[in-house]
Image (tube, rainbow, N blue to C red):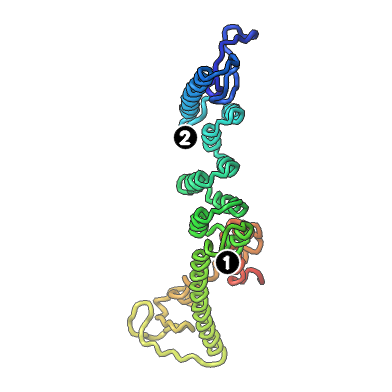
Amino acid sequence: LYLTSKLTDNVDPMAPNRAVWQMSPVGGRGAQGSGSGSVGQGSSGQEGEVVSAEYSDRLEKAFALLKKGWPAGGEPKYDAENALVVCHLHAFKQGVLFLYERMKMYRDVLKVYMDGNDCAGLIQAVMRLGDESYGGDSRLWVDVLEFFGKFDGDCSEQVKEVLAHIESRNLLPPIVVLQILSQNAHLTLSVVKDYMARILRDESAVIEEDKRAVEKYRRETANMQKELKELKTQARVFQNSKCSACSAPLELPAVHFLCMHSFHSRCLGENERECPICTPQNYTILDMRRSQRQSISEPDKFFTQLQHSGDGFAVVAEYFGRGLMNL
């Protein structure tokens, strides 16, 4: 009842004790009389202002009723879907937005602003609803970017703000961002210039870091291969003078390992086949290798990581680097 525009004195024959609410344009001309003249026009204008003010007051009461019936974090005391239908029928935008947000239909909230080409309202909404720290969905920024990519008008400032959030959250690859924005003929290169400069700078830093890591791994691999070759082709000379366990001078019987650790036989106890210093690290490596082999029998784990990762190429590269693709 709050959302209808005018209460008349007509009586509903099916409900004689209830007044009838009729829909009519807010501030529009009433159905009474067709008199002309300045007096009549003045009276009609005053009546329109009264109706408009009274209708606006009832809209505020309607919104307060919706909020009171559905407090934040609680359950609604009314049928939310029916309330949403009523708000749509009466074009009650404030109520529609409130109900969509309470029902966590965030994309529908944005669509209301998109349909009205309300860029400022759209940005404010996505800033609130796209914040994951408050239970929002950061992917809404992608929907907003796609909207501005098809927007018929100048939206340079809004696009710059959206790009800043997409970059900070790493939501889209730069090439996809450019493909989306290329659909808008009103946007110029200056809009994405700073964004692309930052992306290229960050990518260059990552490339340099990867190059240093590759060079480091190459040196370590070369040293390991050299050491393996020496173990296979050359004799080892053990010159340790102290026990690696008790640090006392070595006395016979002594046990020497190829890892160049030496021990008294009594310090090793019953286990004389494994170096007690290197064994934990060796077992760690063996466990990692065993885990890698088990990963081969769990392809769903790989595809799950690939689906939920922000950088799918990095996941594939990691699996190749760990040798899981060619075991």
Q: What amino acid type should be assigned to the residue bearing mark 2?
A: Gly
- Image quadrant holding the C terminus, namely bottom right
Label 1 SS: helix
Residue at image position (52%, 70%) is 200
Q: Earlier in the sequence, mark 1 or mark 2?
A: 2
> Residue 229: x, y in percent?
56, 88
Task: Give whichever of 226, 306 is nearer the camera.
Answer: 306
Mark 2 crowdedness (10 Å alpha carbons): few <14, some 14-19, many ≥20? few
The residue lying toward the viewer, choosing from 209 and 20, is 20
Rendering coords of residue 90 (x, y %):
59, 28
Q: Is residue 246 left or right of residue 139?
A: left
Residue carrying label 2 = 73
Residue at image x 60%, y 58%? 181
Q: Is residue 95 left or right of residue 249?
A: right
Nearest the camera: 65 or 278? 65
Identify the residue position indicated by label 1 in the image.
314
Viewer can see residue 86:
yes
Which residue in the rendered view is the most extreme toward the left? Answer: 248
How dense is the environment of label 1, judged by Cα within 10 Å: few (below 14), some, or many (20 and up)?
Answer: few
Look at 58% across and 62% down and name the residue there. Answer: 173
Residue 273, placed above or below residue 16: below
Q: Is residue 249 above or below residue 17?
A: below
Mark 1 belongs to which amino acid?
A: Ala
- Residue 264: which quarter of the image? bottom left
Percent x, y of residue 275: 46, 77
Residue 108, image x, y percentages: 59, 41
Quadrant of image for the N terminus:
top right
User: Is the C-beta separation of discs 1 and 2 under 8 Å?
Assistant: no
* Image quadrant where residue 232 sits: bottom right
Q: Is residue 309 visible?
A: no
User: How far apart are the alpha carbons under marks 1 and 2?
Assistant: 39 Å
Task: Please determine whether, in this image, residue 63 is positioned above or below residue 119.
Answer: above
